[in-house]
Amino acid sequence: MKIATFNINGIKARAQALADWLDAAQPDVVLLQEIKSVDENFPRELFEDRGYQVETHGQKSFNGVAILSKLPLEDVTRGLPGDDDDEQARWIEATVIGDNTALRLCGLYLPNGNPAPGPKYDYKLAWMERLRARAIELLASEEPALMAGDYNVIPQAEDAAKPEAWVEDALFLPQTRDAFRRIQNLGYTEAFRTRHPEPGHYSFWDYQAGAWQRNNGIRIDHVLMTPQCADLLVDCGIDKEIRGYDKPSDHVPVWVELAA
């Protein structure tokens, strides 16, 4: 089972680019972030024609997450528990039925948090605490599960080409990295680093100042797996090359292959 996470940065602008990548990469499931579309305006037919079931949790102009799946999906839920007043569309989860395993998938778009300090950063840290609570529940189920998406977290200095440029940014502040580690240290495996411990791997390049051309990137798109899911890990990678295509997202897909 091949599962990918991809911050598409606007489905309206990049629907065909996403479809072209799907045709080439052939993932079974894709967790999308920043669709920037209400549910009824999502171009679902483009993906249904390719055999994908489409589940969205959209929001006008901002945020928005979705799941595309060639495999059966069950028990789709929307919204991260813990704050009934939170109207931002940043969380979607479902159970995907593989050949041998049922897997709980959680797609997330974690708040950016800038400028920090400030209310946006407070919201980020509060959201991460809610994420930690959900992570504890997933572990308690003792079933294969993963949480994947744009975490807006640079976990370590080697996850940035120029870490010194990020020291005052909400993505790299010590409190942010500590909150990420508190989740990971519950017992989660970070898929990419399991397979690729060396530096120099990124999943985001800004549109400004020739960041892509100079490979001035950061790695902020992650897949965290419960122990039962980590046992199924076959491989993990980043489809870096599509950042150089026409009208790209500023993110690229990160994928895992599971024996599921």
Image (cartoon, rainbow, N blue to C red):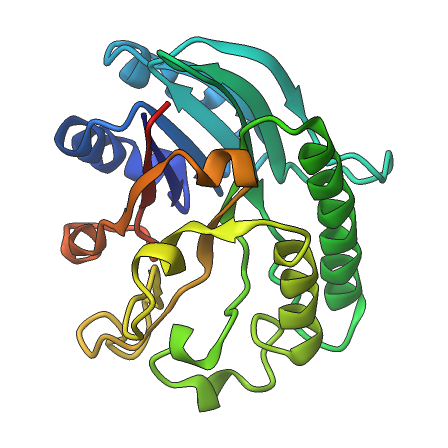
When the figure is inspected, residue 145 is found, relative to residue 148, above or below; the finding is above
Question: In which quadrant of the rendered image does the N terminus lie?
Answer: top left
Residue 191 in percent (x, y) is at 41, 50
Q: In this view, does 75 lie above or below 168?
A: above
In the drawing, does residue 209 fall left or right of residue 124? left
| Residue 128 percent coordinates (x, y) | 72, 54
Residue 249 x %, y % = 32, 51
Q: Which residue is drawn at 78% across and 44% down?
A: 133
Q: In this view, does 45 lie to the left or right of 56?
A: left
Q: Which of 14 and 161 is in front in this view?
A: 161
Q: Which of 85 and 200 is in front in this view?
A: 200
Residue 64 visible to an observer of this rendering: no
- The count of marks equals 0
- Which percent across, then down, holds residue 151? 54, 55
In the picture, measured across the screen, residue 209 lies left or right of residue 35, that is left
Corner quadrant of residue 114 = bottom right
**Residue 33 visible in image:** yes
Q: Residue at x 66, y 20 (%)?
A: 77
Q: Residue at x 33, y 27 (%)?
A: 259
Q: In which quarter of the image is residue 227?
A: top right
Q: Residue at coordinates 54% horizontally, 18% vertically from top-left?
A: 95
> Which quadrant is home to the C terminus?
top left
